Image (cartoon, rainbow, N blue to C red):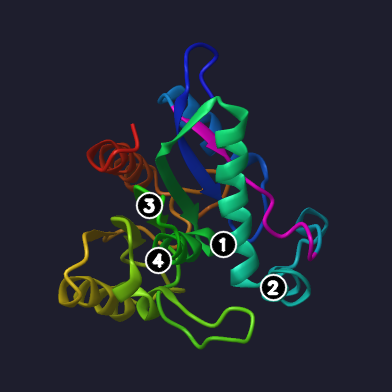
Amino acid sequence: MPDKGGPFPVVLVVEEIFGVHEHIKDVCRRLAKAGYLAVAPELFRRQGDVSKITDIPEIFSKVVSKVPDAQVMSDLDSTAAWVKKDGKGDTSKLGITGFCWGGRIVWLYAAHSKDLKAGVAWYGRLVGKGTDLQPKYPIDVVDSLKAPVLGLYGGKDQAIPLDSVEKMRDALKNEKKTGEIVVFPDAGHGFNADYRPSYNKDAAEAGWKRLLEWFKKYGVA
């Protein structure tokens, strides 16, 4: 958070599958420089320490696949409650942003939380086959969205087909929900991850600008 002033508007930051590593911490710092109290809870901690695993399929099979969505929703609620109790954050101005795995969570949390003002989802999967622990995808909860969500996606994303992005766009329109999906044509998956080869500077900077505008427009500022 900023070193002076407050209470500050609050942004929950939701990790990629790689946990709360340096990139996620840096996102929090960047949000603090923009005037926010940003907090990234370690949402996999009960299931395992992903920082000790380097193989992506192993991260999924050993840890991430065992994290119940219901637990994540509850932990995000508890994080917001902790910030409110601490007194340094103004949770009447509550936002959320997340990346990849966390992008999907942003959509789900916008359907879950009555206190959320706005969300920004970076390349979160939109459709898929549910499991007992992770029963629904964003496309399944559009009718329940309680806050405006901005979705930021890459046109060259091999993990998230553009037809699924269009389905989500249509669903938002059909359900008359406030939401917007932006596709950056030359960006692939993880285009904001400046520590990976997938980083696309133009798309990342444009996406960040849109995030700040979205939060300001919908009361997280």
Q: Nearer the viewer, mark 3 or mark 2?
A: 3
Residue at image location 56% in from the left, 62% down from the top: 73
Q: Which residues are magenta?
A: 36-47
* Vertical relation: 166 (above or below) 93: below
Residue at image location 49% in from the left, 55% down from the top: 99
Point out which mark residue 73 bears: 1
Earlier sequence position, callout 4 versus callout 2:
2
Q: Nearer the viewer, residue 42 or 183?
A: 42
Q: Quadrant of the N terminus?
A: top right
Earlier sequence position, callout 4 versus callout 1:
1
In the rendering, at what x and y percent does residue 95 appear? 41, 44
Earlier sequence position, callout 1 versus callout 3:
1
Point out which mark residue 60 bears: 2
Earlier sequence position, callout 1 versus callout 2:
2
Q: Nearer the viewer, mark 1 or mark 2?
A: 1
Point out which mark residue 119 bears: 3
Point out which mark residue 187 bears: none
* Vertical relation: 68 (above or below) 219: below
Q: Cβ–Cβ below 8 Å for labels 1 and 3?
A: no
Circle 4 is placed at which residue position? 111
Q: Quadrant of the C terminus?
A: top left
* Vertical relation: 103 (above or below) 94: below
